[in-house]
Image (cartoon, rainbow, N blue to C red):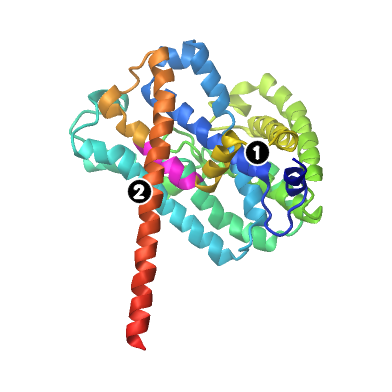
Amino acid sequence: MEKQSSIIKRSPKNNRILAIDFGRGFSVIAMIMVHTLWIHAQQNVQSDTFLGHFIHFVGRGTPVFLITMGVSFMISRNQSIQSAIKRGILILGVAYLMNFLKFLTPILVGLMPDSFITAYGWESPLNIEKYMYLLLTGDILQLAGISLVILGFVRAYVKNKFLILGLAIVIAFLSVELRDFQSGTVGLSYITQLLWSNGYWVYFSVFPWISFILLGMFFGQWYIEMDYDQDKLFKRMFIGGIICILVGAPLVFMAEEYHFNDFFHLGPGGVIYLAGWNFAVLSIFHWLLTKTKNNSVYRTFYYCSKNVTSLYVIQWVLICWGMIFFGFQSMSELETIVLMPLFMGLTFMVHFVFMRLKKGFRSNRDTFKRKISIESQ
C-alpha cells in the first residue's frame, strides 16, 4: 500500500501517472458500451430507457481520453516535432483503415444489413461517392492524428502553460463561429469539415475538441513545474474542475443549444462544463488509487490504456461486423445489455491474438536481420 502511494505521488523518472492510465483505460471500456448502444440498440432503447440515459451519461466522459492524451503528450520522453508529426500521420492512416474495415468490408462482401444503408437514406448498390463518404467519416482517431501534428508545434514553441490554457479557451469560443465557414471546393471542403464540422460526417472536429487536449497539456506542463508531484497536480485539477463546472453549467443552462448543442458540436460553455466534470473525475480516480490496493480491475484499465489505439480499432470493427448477426439498431434493452460484455470479451480475445501475431512477426523479423548480419560478415 505504502509502495503504491509513493509511486503515485512522485515519478520523475518514468512519468507514469496511474490516474491518467486508469482514466484512459476506463474510457476504452466506456466506448465499447456506448458504441454497442449506438449500433445495436433500438432507437427507443437509446432515448427512452434507463440504459440509454445511463450509457449516454457515461459517454460524456469522452473528454477524459483527450485530457489524458494532452497530459501524456506533454510529459512524454520524445518531445520532437518530427515525432509528433510521424505519430499523427500514423494514427490518421489507422483511422481510415478502421473505416474501411468497419464499414466498407461488410458492404463489399454483401453482408451489411439493408437497414444500415437505409439509415443513411441510400439504396444498394452504393456508388463510389457513397463509399468515399463512409471511408472518410471523421472519428476520434482523425481528431487525434490531426491534433498531434498541430500540438507538436504548440509544445515546441509555447512554453508558458497559461498561454496553452488561453489557446484552449480561445478555440472553444471560436469554434461555433467557424462552423459556417465551409469551403465549396472538393478536397478543401473535407479539410474544413475535419477542422470545424457542422454536421455528422465528422463526429469529432478539431475545433472545439482539441481544447480538451490543450487543457490536458496545461496540467501536464504544470505537473512538470511541480516537480512531478501528483498529489498537487490532482488537487489543483479538482479545484480547476469545480471552477469550470461553476462557470460552464450556467452557460449551458441559459443557452443549451448554443453552448452544448448535440454534444458532438459543443459550444464554449459545453467545453468548459464537460472539462470540469472530467477534471473532477480524474482527481477522484487519483484519490481512489491512493486509498486502495492494486487489483485485476485496475490492471485491466492499465492494459486498456497501454493499448488504447489497437483496442479502439478492434472494438469498433467487431461492433460494426456484429450487424451481420444482430442487425442494425434492432436489439431490445435486455439484448443490448447482453451484447456489451460479449463485445468486451471478443475485443480482448482478438487483441490477445493480434498481440501474439505482432510479437511473432517482430521476433521473426529480428531473427532474419541477425541472420543477414551474420552472413554479411
Q: Nearer the viewer, mark 2 or mark 1?
A: 1
Relative image position of residue 97 (x, y in whole percent): 35, 48
Q: Residue at x 79, y 49 (%)?
A: 229
Relative image position of residue 22 (x, y in whole percent): 62, 39
Q: Which residue is mark 1?
A: 294
Q: Residue at x 31, y 44 (%)?
A: 100
> Within the magenta stretch, is there residue 154?
no
Residue 97 circle label? 2
Image quadrant for the C terminus? bottom left
The residue under label 2 is which amino acid type? Leu
Relative image position of residue 266 (x, y in whole percent): 58, 32
The residue under label 1 is which amino acid type? Asn
Q: Residue at x 45, y 42 (%)?
A: 311
Q: Residue at x 25, y 36 (%)?
A: 106
Contact? badges 2 and 1 (CB < 8 Å) = no
Q: Quadrant of residue 2?
A: top right
Relative image position of residue 247 (x, y in whole percent): 76, 29
